[in-house]
Amino acid sequence: VTGEFALIDLIHSRLAGPPGSGQVWVGDDAAVVRVRSGPLLLTADTLVAGVHADLSLTGVDDFGWKALAVSVSDIAAMGGDPAYALVAVSAPAGTDFAALFDGLSEAADEIGCPIVGGDTTSAGALVVTVAVVGHCDGDPVLRSGARPDDEVWVTGALGASAAGLRLLRAGAAATGEAAASMRAHARPQPHVAEGAAARRAGASAMIDVSDGLTADLRHLATASGVGFNLQDIPRAPGATLAEALGGGDDYVLAFTAPPRTAVAASFAGLRTPVRIGRCTTDPAEMTVDGNEVEASGWEHRF
Amino acid sequence: VTGEFALIDLIHSRLAGPPGSGQVWVGDDAAVVRVRSGPLLLTADTLVAGVHADLSLTGVDDFGWKALAVSVSDIAAMGGDPAYALVAVSAPAGTDFAALFDGLSEAADEIGCPIVGGDTTSAGALVVTVAVVGHCDGDPVLRSGARPDDEVWVTGALGASAAGLRLLRAGAAATGEAAASMRAHARPQPHVAEGAAARRAGASAMIDVSDGLTADLRHLATASGVGFNLQDIPRAPGATLAEALGGGDDYVLAFTAPPRTAVAASFAGLRTPVRIGRCTTDPAEMTVDGNEVEASGWEHRF
């Protein structure tokens, strides 16, 4: 691929056709889509090669997958349903666009969130921004609704991504448990159905675990004015407690719900949520198994 | 500014409050917005410092302005009405975020397209992607609807941005005509009202002039299967014909309409459109004042 317009042809070849009548695919100035009535969710996340992924350890196709998955995860964290994605790629010469868009389109297909447009530009670094528009059948779950005594839940075990990265860096063999962790790191799965289930169950607040469990719960603490007493954090096989608490990039959802909410009923057939503690009245409080923990997790420096 | 969360506070301080009830501002996982019924327009454009703007000639605030304006221009080119913007910024250490978001928010305020969310990441280069969601009261105007004998119109004079860039590079004094060109280069104005007027008038196809008039009309030619005989291209004061035809970055709209369409009536109170020619049957044909022209304009190389 040498020119922008040849590249656009390559991208088109990797995307499925328009998903329905009345829709205009990539190639016009803007995509034309139909949306359901009700609130619309809008989000955009950016991945930078070398910052959010080490492309000597995972593939450019994985990078594309992850870029779409992490934006979808933000929709999941509101209890919403991803509908359409826009993909903006800035890339240096020599970038393997075919692999990048393979990963993007595999994620779009598997998640059910078609890519309807975007932009490609040349730049010194590979930077991919994915904007996602989502629906929500009901009131979106915000970060600000947690109340003291609410129970805290997560939709899966934590630390797999950090453990996978550690194993990739060590050159470990990709077998069994190690392979699963590596895959969790390379191709995170947004918990879309679980987010909607938590919303239907009556979740009071929700966030996806991208920076790290305690760091992300601090965002909930700030928005809701509650603290957290946590215990028995479910760890992914092979993950350390530090990786489970601070590793991030798991895209499990953490949510709160009033005491005695019948959470399990909404999750039939989905990943089983695990209760990990309770909200307290002091927003500065964050304990795990009785020990005070510092905020940890990823923060960009400028 | 040293950390991401301090930066997010800075960004919030530069954005107006939520524009209405039922809306969640930046700071949750996704923004919650209400949209009107009818088709929704989605677009995303990326600006890379050093590629799309020379920050030794124009300010970081201008870069922010332009990033929002060019995405809005894509909505204008469909005859739509911009509603909400998401801003994703990747930036190196030392970036003047205050100035960047001043420019972004000035454009958002002036255009009436509030920034409702986004992302900030650290990266080696300043890369800004703006995704815009827009409404359209009626059928969006595509690139593919032009027919032979349709008349070709532009919503303003061309070449101002290229002339302004030339003058900035030459260190010309920013007075009079030169100042206007420089400002057109630094802070392009999307023709939102004119795009809607062209749609209401019955435009058959439309595109915004970002790559250059002839390059962008080639996109229309490909999508519609028509050629173009053009003449008397309106030039911005001080712009050469080459700058008017190939300079790009003007964000004037070019549209086609069936012969004898009463275009002017829809444009009362707006920029007066200028008729510049006619569509022909041969998609390979592109003449200006009787001379065959090569495609010219910007194409990224990878």
Image: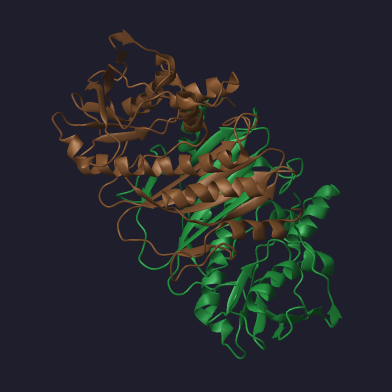
Chain colours: A brown, B green
Q: Quadrant of residue B284?
A: bottom right
Give the farthest residue toward the top. A291
Give the farthest residue toward the front. A175
Is B182 located above or below residue B217 in the figure?
Answer: above
* Whether residue B102 can be seen here: no
Is B218 located above or below residue B189 in the figure?
Answer: below
- Residue at image point 71% right, 49% down: B52
Q: How many labels, in total? A: 0
- Which x, y percent locates residue B221? 69, 75
- Residue at image point 48% right, 50% down: A108
Compare residues B18 and B278 and report the one nearer the observer: B278
Give the farthest residue toward the bottom. B260
Left or right position of B93 against B113: right
Q: Quadrant of residue A129?
A: top right
Left or right position of B105 against A9: left
- Which x, y percent locates residue B226? 69, 81
Left or right position of B123 against A266: right
Left or right position of A2 against B92: right
> Which quarter shows the N terminus of chain B?
top right
- Which x, y percent locates residue B270? 56, 72
* Whether residue B68 can be seen here: yes
Compare residues A159 and B140 and report the one nearer the observer: A159
Q: Quadrant of residue B69?
A: bottom right
Is A90 located above or below residue A260 in the figure?
Answer: below
- Which x, y percent locates residue A206? 31, 35
